[in-house]
Amino acid sequence: MDNLELSDWLKNAGNELYKAGHYIPALEKYQNAIAALSNIFYFGNYTREMAVLWNNRANALFKLQRWSDALHSAEQSVQLYPSFVKVSCTTLPTVFFFLFFFFPQFFLLCISYYSTCIHMSGRSHRM
């Protein structure tokens, strides 16, 4: 099994664990998948695959209420693949909402990011 196949297998195993509510083992699978893909990342065009892994990691961290780590992982995903709308307009705003809930100083950042998501998606939304 090469690193790409290993990474994909680990991602799928993490997804099954995540669906079953086993977030810590899922997080470990996603981290191992990121490590496996990192070994070949610069030898091919694996940007989208890596962005998906970072997004999955962000979601597991979010479920574990590790807000700061979830935000960092979601940002990594967006930096790798800015047009990955699932991350840009779903994961990050959700993380921002919970950050705002616990840290109200994030309000303007949340509103700004929501506006950016609307612009990126090309849709009109009302607040």
Image (tube, rainbow, N blue to C red):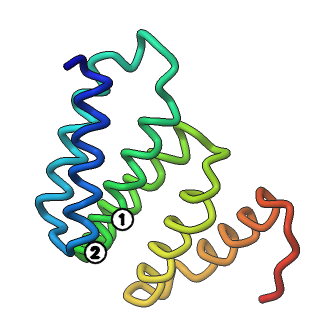
Identify which amino acid the numbered label 1 is placed on. Asn
- Residue placed under numbered mark 1 in the picture: 59
Q: Is 48 located above or below residue 70 in the figure?
A: above
Residue 32 placed where, x, y %?
Answer: 18, 39
For the C terminus, give its image quadrant: bottom right
Q: Is 34 located above or below residue 118 in the figure?
A: above
Binning the other alpha carbons within 10 Å of mark 1 as few (below 14), some (14 to 19) or many (20 upward) gives many
- Residue placed under numbered mark 2 in the picture: 63
For the N terminus, give its image quadrant: top left
Q: Which mark is residue 10?
A: none
The answer to whether 53 appears left or right of 45 in the picture is left
Which quadrant holds residue 39?
Answer: top left
Residue 85 placed where, x, y %?
Answer: 64, 55
Residue 107 placed where, x, y %?
Answer: 58, 82
Q: Please name whichever residue, 33 or 102, is drawn nearer the observer in this view of the structure.
A: 33
Q: Residue at x 20, y 56 (%)?
A: 27
The answer to whether 13 appears left or right of 90 in the picture is left
Binning the other alpha carbons within 10 Å of mark 2 as few (below 14), some (14 to 19) or many (20 upward) gives some
Identify which amino acid the numbered label 2 is placed on. Lys
Name the element at disc 1. helix
Residue 91 placed where, x, y %?
Answer: 50, 66
Q: Residue at x 50, y 82 (%)?
A: 97
Which quadrant holds residue 88?
Answer: bottom right
The answer to whether 75 appears left or right of 29 in the picture is right
CA separation in Å, label 2 and label 1: 6 Å
Q: Is 18 located above or below residue 50 in the figure?
A: below
Q: Dots 2 and 1: beta carbons under 8 Å?
A: yes
